[in-house]
Image: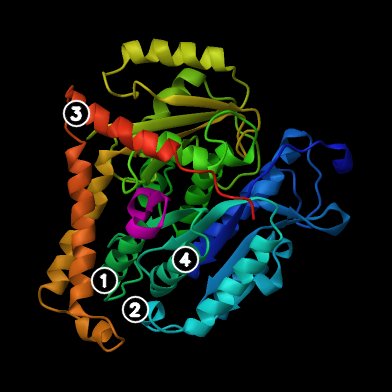
Amino acid sequence: LEVSRVIKSMQREIITVQIGRCGNRVGTKFWEIIANEHGIEPDGFYRGDSPLQLERIGVYFNEMRRQKYCPRAIFIGSESRVLDTVHFSPYGDLFKPNHSLCYLSSNSYKGHYAEEMDIEVIMDIIRREAEISDELQGFQLIHSLGGSTGSRSGSSIITKIREEYPNRILSSFSMFPTPKISDALVTESYNVTLATHHLIENVDETFCIENEALRNISLHTLKITQPTYHDFDHIASMAMSGVTSFLRFPGQLNSDLHELGVSMIPLPKLHFLMFGCTPLPIHSFAESELVNTNYLIQQLFDERYMMTTYNPRNGRYLAASAMFRGPISMHDLETQISNIRMTMIPGCIPKNIKLGTCDIPTRGTKNTAVSLFNATAIQEIFANIRLKYTAMFQHKTFFHWYKSEGMEEAEFVEVDNTIKDLITEYQQYEVVSNDEDWIDEVDDGMEAVNDMEQPDQK
C-alpha cells in the first residue's frame, strides 16, 4: 500500500499538551498505542495494513517530509528526567525535541501567578503547532490534578489557551488522586481544588480518570497482585485510546470534539465525562481471542471497567455513547443490545445510548468496546474534593504558602463556591422526573450547544 495513493477525508487537527510527571507518563504510553493502531512504526513511517488507518491520521499526527508522521504533541515538565523518559521511550523518536520544555517548580501555586516567561515559551510552541494546522478543532491536555506541575502549570496553560483560542474546543484527560496512590504532597487538596475550578470554568470536555479506579482494575479485574504506576499508565492509556477512536477513525458517532460536546454535554458546566473500556489486555502485543459480543456488552456497563470508582447507575444518565471496535455490524449490535436489555436489571443500559462501530480494534485485541457517559454520579468526586479542601481551609492549613505568592482568601472562597455550585447543578438533574419543565430546560441547553458556531478556520 502506497501512502501517496490513499485518499484522506477532511481532517481537523487536535494538539495534545502533556503536563507533569503523570501527564507525560500516561501521554507517552497513549502515543505508543495509537501509533501502533494507525500502523506507524517507531521510526515514524507507515507500515500498516488498512487504508482506514490513514483516513483520519491527520487529526493526531502531522505528516512531515518523506511521508513520515509526527505526533501533534507538546511536553511540559519540571524535571529533565521526566522528559527524558518521553524521548527515550520506544516511540520517543517520533516526537519533536523542540516541543519539550523543562523548568523548575515549587510546591506552591505560584505558577498560576508567576513564571510568565515559561508560560509564554509554552504558548509559543503551541502557536507554532497551531499555525501548521489546516483546520484546528481544539486541544487535548493530559495531566494530574494532585501534583504541583500538573495542577498549577496545567491551570495556567488552560487559562492561556482559552484566552488565545476562544473558538476552539478545549478538552482534558484529568487524573484525580487518591490517598492510596499519591505523591503525598501536603498541599494536594488545595492543588486538586484549584485545578478543578479551572476545569469547570475554562474546559469544554473533561474525561475523568481516578487513580483509585486504576488500582481497583489492576487488583480485582486484571488480578495483578502488586500493581505499579506502569500498570496504571497502561490501563489509562488503553482506555484513552478507546475513547479517542471516535475522533481518529471514520464513523458517524462523535466524529470531532464539537460533535462529541453536542451529543454528550446538555449543559456547559456539566462537561465531566466517565468512560470505560473492555477488555483490557495486560501489556501484551499478542492478539487476544475474539470476545463474545453479548459478554462484551455486559462488561461495558460494569463499573469494574470504568476509569472512575462511581457507578453511573447511582444517579441519572444525562447522555451515553458506546463504540464497538472489531468485526461487528451495527444491525447485529443493536439487536444484541435490545435482547440483553430485556434480561438485565432496568437501567443497566441507558435508554438513549448512541452506538458506533469501528473496524480497527484496540491493539492486542480482536474486538473491544468503549463506553462514554455523562452521569450525575460524577458529583461524588467533587463532593470528596470539597470535603478535604474545606477541612484544610477552615484552619488555614498551609494557606500562608499561597498567600505569599499573591493569592487572596476571597479567591479560595470563590473556588469552593464554584465546586459547590457544580454539585448543586448535578443534583438538580439527578432526580428522575417526568416534569416537562425539566425536559424543556435540558432541551434548551442542547439547542444552545447545537447553535454554537463551528470553530472558524484558522
* Residue ID for mark 3: 437
User: Amino acid under label 3?
Assistant: Asp
Residue 372 visible here? no
Residue shown at 62%/61% (left/top)?
A: 73
* Residue ID for mark 4: 163
Label 2: which secondary element: loop
Indicate the quadrant where residue 15 lies.
bottom right
Indicate the quadrant where residue 181 lies.
bottom left
User: Amino acid under label 1?
Assistant: Tyr
- State if disc 2 and disc 1 touch (CB < 8 Å): yes
User: Amino acid under label 2?
Assistant: Tyr
- Residue 190's label in the rendered image is 1
User: In x, y percent, where is residue 299?
Assistant: 41, 29
Label 4: which secondary element: helix
Residue shown at 75%/48% (left/top)?
A: 40
Of 161 and 342, nearer the camera is 161
Whole-number angstrom distance, CA of label 1 to CA of label 3: 38 Å
Whole-number angstrom distance, CA of label 3 to CA of label 4: 35 Å
